[in-house]
Image (cartoon, grey):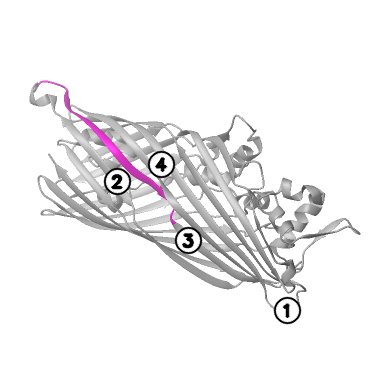
Amino acid sequence: MRRASIILLITTLSSFLIHAQTAEDALRFSRVFYSGTARFNGLSGAFGAVGADFSTLATNPAGIGLYTASEMTLTLAPTIGYSSTMYNGTNASDNRLNFGVGNFGVIFNINPYSKNKSGVIKNINVGFGFNRQNDFNNRVAINGVNSKNSLMQSYANTLNAEKTPPAYIQEDFPFDIGLAYGTNLVFHDSATNKYYSDAEFGGVIQNKLISTYGSMNELDLSVGANIADKLFVGMTFGVPTINFYQNSIYKETRTNDTIPNFISLNYRYNLHTRGTGINLKVGLIYKPAGWVRIGASIHTPTWFPTMRDQWSASMQSTFTNPEWNSTQYSPIGTYDYRLTTPFRAMGSLALIIGQFGLVSADYEYVNYSQARFNSSYDSYDDVNKVIETDYQSYGNIRVGTEWRVYNFRVRGGFGYFSNPYTGGTNNSERFQVSGGIGYRLKHFFTDVTYVWTKMNQDYYLYDPGMVNPAIISNYTNTVSATVGIRF
């Protein structure tokens, strides 16, 4: 039941608290699914030991040291997201199209070796621009019949458990239960001093549409060097920005007229989260032989000192007696806080097959239980304890290959992002498959890549002790196209 209570925090709209941050919020902004150029995406991001691609500034900045010329890149990445859900035996699906920018960046090459051929430092490169780190655009539809209980009854159970006096309901729960009480969906019986709802034993069709928008992008400023064509080192100062929106519509409608009075409820909830952070990345690539490269990098925790949530809600009720119909609106809630996401470490290996191609692999270690909230106003001890207990430290694996056919390149890759949850209640493994082609000339190149991803999750409409989970499968289909020039 303890795990179930955590999922409740994650999946219900518990914004009646002073602040709305949950363990799931920390996980959302700690999981990074690196994107960027189409070439990088074509190998599913397995570039830690390959280098010479702008996206490596966000993974292993030593990759900038392998540049031998200046370069500018721009990537467009339209995405079609598709979700499929199963709830109480009923299937539902939805999709969404989004147009995004995967990266934009410039690398400036400095070549001291051309002036001093005896020098150890062959190249110094400086780069700046941005890479996309997470795409939040998605839409999920949940639909099914609940013959046992309702959201209204879960609210009544909360009020009964906390013994909340009627006069304090809207003050204590202004964003959900207070709205239900104000719209007559939950009522108080003074004779028993208990709260009730019309759909105590279910008999309702439940629908929820969850739309998320936004992205997490990182502005990268990097410097790297080539030392004796053997060792490549680099450092990136990163400034990630978060812009996340969530809009949800939850509906309950009686299945027949056996439920007295009640016809339907409609609950809307809107959340906007934004923040700016800083981090530092350092890395190296070593070439013990011409055909092998070994890479390693370390990312400091990302500190977000200026996180802000803004949220609001509304609820509408419909009854057989029109005089009971009502609509209530919440105030607008805002809260400022700080977030620290986990430290990361990466190890990489690439095999270079002459002028024909390469095979590469990356392993990324990240411990999601290290994420932490804090604030100057309130204690986050309870939420941080949930994060520490319920998340784990398994790693992520990316492998990729690229082959040369005259001026053309053919690429493929696979990525596995492990389940961040402990226990077996939820499984959010993510799988990624990619493939692409490219065309390269001395001063111009273009690449196109298709990336398919899948991730499952369990979602509870409210108290897991009352409802079955909705089993959600999220799919994304992304086509990224990069154009670049060398100068």
Residue 257: numbered disc: 1
The residue closer to the viewer here, 273 or 8, is: 273
Q: Position of residue 244 (x, y in %)?
A: 47, 48
Q: Which secondary structure, mark 3?
A: strand
* Residues in magenta, as a range: 118-137
The residue closer to the viewer here, 147 or 260, is: 260
Circle 3 sits on which residue?
A: 139
Instruction: Decide which of tag 4 and tag 3 comes sooner along the chain.
Output: 3
Q: CA distance from mark 2 to mark 4?
A: 21 Å
Instruction: Decide which of tag 2 and tag 1 comes sooner along the chain.
Output: 2
Query: Disc 3 marks which amino acid?
Result: Arg
In the rendered image, residue 216 lying in the magenta stretch gets the answer: no
Q: Residues within 10 Å of mark 3 (few under 14, many from 20)?
A: many
Q: Which secondary structure, mark 2?
A: strand
Instruction: Say if residue 51 shows up in the picture.
Output: no
Circle 2 sits on which residue?
A: 103
